[in-house]
Amino acid sequence: MKDKTVQYIPAVRENAALGLASGAYLAGKKSCVLMQNSGLGNIINALTSFNLIYGVPVLIFMTWRGFEGRDAPEHIVMGKKMLPLLKELGLPYRVLTDNYKKDIDWALDKMDEFAIPAALILKEGMIA
Amino acid sequence: MNTRQAIEIILSRLREDDIALFTTGYISRHAFSIKDRDANFYMIGSMGLLSSVGLGIALNSDKKVFIFDGDGSALMDMGAMAMIASHKAPNIVHIVLDNRSYMSTGGQPTISKNIDFSYVAQACGYKRSLKISSVNQLRKSFPGILSGGGPVFLHLKTRDESPVDAGRVSIGPEALSRRLINKITEE
């Protein structure tokens, strides 16, 4: 967020964030969304009846709350269902590794190739 | 004033470069059948999302962005009004065509008869917020609406007796995106 070349825009909920980032793309900019995985539930309609059919790629960084069932109760179900949901939606996704630059390049390639959003999953400790 | 008249009046006053985004359902269908143009974008799905997309465009472009929402779609994602106002996008004109019904699913009533959108917009911090309920008033509000900065909010009280014959948007969604990107990024 200290990087002056990147504009940070707070959004009120995850689908609004995806909409904003998609608008930036339509205006010729690259954009990404940062969210907790509970928000995956909030963006499914935006994905299925906007991004995936309009060919609007956005990079989505998603935290993995509920990883291996070790978290507060509200995160357990999504923690378990997140990867199957992404797979079912047909979104390219990858769990971010220490070699994150390579992972980001992989996601950007997929977005270019298919003109759809891609997701990079962050495990605990990767962002503050 | 009905929805179609309101869209017709505004569309006829847009400059060639002004971006016009139309929400799901009859609002898109009316606009497409009145006057399709390269700077028009029709949201056929994702009801409620258009205003966020419009903000994303406006913050990344110098063009004027007209967002045509309905009462149903505006209510669905009312947080987007808070975002548009908070980010003070000067180039946005956000229009809510309020016929108090979900017209494309059979005219079921929304709750908008209880909601004064122009106050909501004012409370969120839009630079200007107008409530308009007649064709004459709408005509008179131009060109004033277009000068003096934004975001501007127009609450248009409309009346639609029954669905008007307006064909579906016949351009595919991907083609709509490409067309809009080309229009916004052209030199």
Image (cartoon, helix red, strand yellow):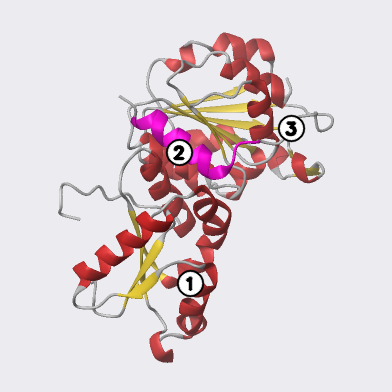
Q: Position of residue A77 (x, y in %)?
A: 52, 83
Position above or below: B124 against B93: below
Quadrant in the rendering for residue B149: top left
Q: Chain of mark 2?
A: B
According to the picture, the residue beneath numbered tag 1 turns out to be A86
- For the point 58% across and 18% down, which residue is it? B10
- Which secondary structure lies at badge 1? helix
Q: Main secondary structure of the magenta part?
A: helix
Question: Which residue is found at the position 48% from the left and 37% from the top?
Answer: B123
Three-letter code, disc 2: Arg
- SS at mark 2 in the image: helix
- In the image, B161: left or right of A95? right
The chain letter for the residue carrying disc 3 is B
Number of residue marks: 3
Above/below status of B26 relative to A24 = above
Specify the segment rendered in magenta: B170-185
Question: What is the spatial separation of the Cα atoms under label 3 and label 2, in whole angstroms?
Answer: 22 Å
Same-subunit check for callouts 1 and 2: no
Work out whether residue B11 or residue B175 is closer to the camera in this orientation and state it. B175
Queried whether the magenta region covers residue A99, the answer comes back as: no
Residue B179 among those drawn in magenta: yes
Marks 3 and 2 in Cβ contact (< 8 Å): no
- Dot 3 or dot 2: first in sequence order is 3
Distance from label 1 to label 2 (Cα)? 25 Å
Residue B71: x %, y % from top left: 65, 39
Tell me the amino acid under the disc marked 1. Leu
Q: Residues within 10 Å of mark 3 (few under 14, many from 20)?
A: few
Which residue position is annotated with label 3?
A: B167
Q: Which residue is mark 2?
A: B178
Q: Nearer the viewer, residue B117 or A56?
A: A56
With respect to residue A76, does A86 lie above or below? above
